[in-house]
Image: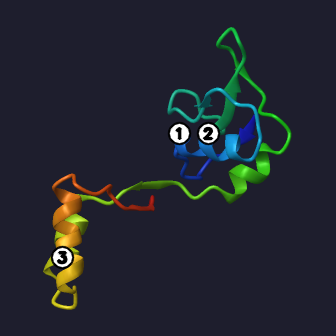
């Protein structure tokens, strides 16, 4: 298990990053850190029986390099769209993204 207290984690994204790095993980979870359980947030995988298990060797480096991403919000697109410096081509791209014709852009979680 790896202590991830205070680090923003996107579990689906991190699982993909670990698999890309050649680490065998089928699922990830975080335990601890709840108000009623004031222990560090610990990242783990699961064994075949569904019990939390230690991560494979090499996982710490992937966690250290992880930058959690999220989809850009409608409000962020609206702010960019209304900016006078935004080009016509970018405005059209924003229209296409918000209409679901193009995938949403990913930005770091804060």
Q: Residues within 10 Å of mark 3 (few under 14, many from 20)?
A: some
Marks 2 and 3, the one that precedes in the sequence: 2
Give the structural element (helix, strand or loop) at label 3: helix
**Where is residue 81 drawn, in percent x and y?**
17, 76
Q: Residues within 10 Å of mark 1 (few under 14, many from 20)?
A: few
Q: CA distance from mark 1 to mark 3?
A: 30 Å
* Residue at the image point whose x is 68% and y is 8% from the top: 49
Residue under pointer 3: 91
The mark lying in front, picked from 2 and 3, is: 3
The label shown at residue 12 is: 1
The answer to whether the residues at label 1 and label 2 have Cβ atoms under 8 Å apart is yes
Residue under pointer 2: 15
Point out the image quarter for the C terminus.
Answer: bottom left
Can residue 105 be seen here? The reply is: yes
Q: CA distance from mark 2 to mark 3?
A: 34 Å
Give the structural element (helix, strand or loop) at label 1: helix
Q: Residues within 10 Å of mark 2 (few under 14, many from 20)?
A: many
- Residue 24, image quadrant: top right
**Where is residue 62 drawn, in percent x and y?**
72, 51
- Residue 18, image quadrant: top right
Asked if residue 27 is positioned above or below residue 93 in the image, the reply reads above
Marks 1 and 3, the one that precedes in the sequence: 1
Asked if residue 85 is positioned above or below residue 51 in the image, the reply reads below
């Amino acid at each position: 298990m790896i202590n991830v207290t205070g680090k923003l984690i996107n579990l689906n994204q991190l699982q993909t990053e670990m698999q890309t790095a050649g680490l065998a993980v089928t699922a990830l979870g975080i335990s601890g850190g709840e108000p009623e359980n004031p222990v560090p947030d610990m990242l783990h995988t699961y064994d075949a029986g569904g019990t939390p298990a230690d991560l494979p060797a090499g996982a710490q480096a992937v966690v250290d390099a992880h930058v959690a991403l999220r989809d850009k919000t409608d409000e962020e697109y609206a702010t960019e769209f209304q900016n006078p410096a935004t080009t016509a081509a970018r405005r059209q791209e924003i229209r296409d993204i918000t209409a679901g014709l193009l995938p949403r852009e990913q930005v770091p979680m804060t």
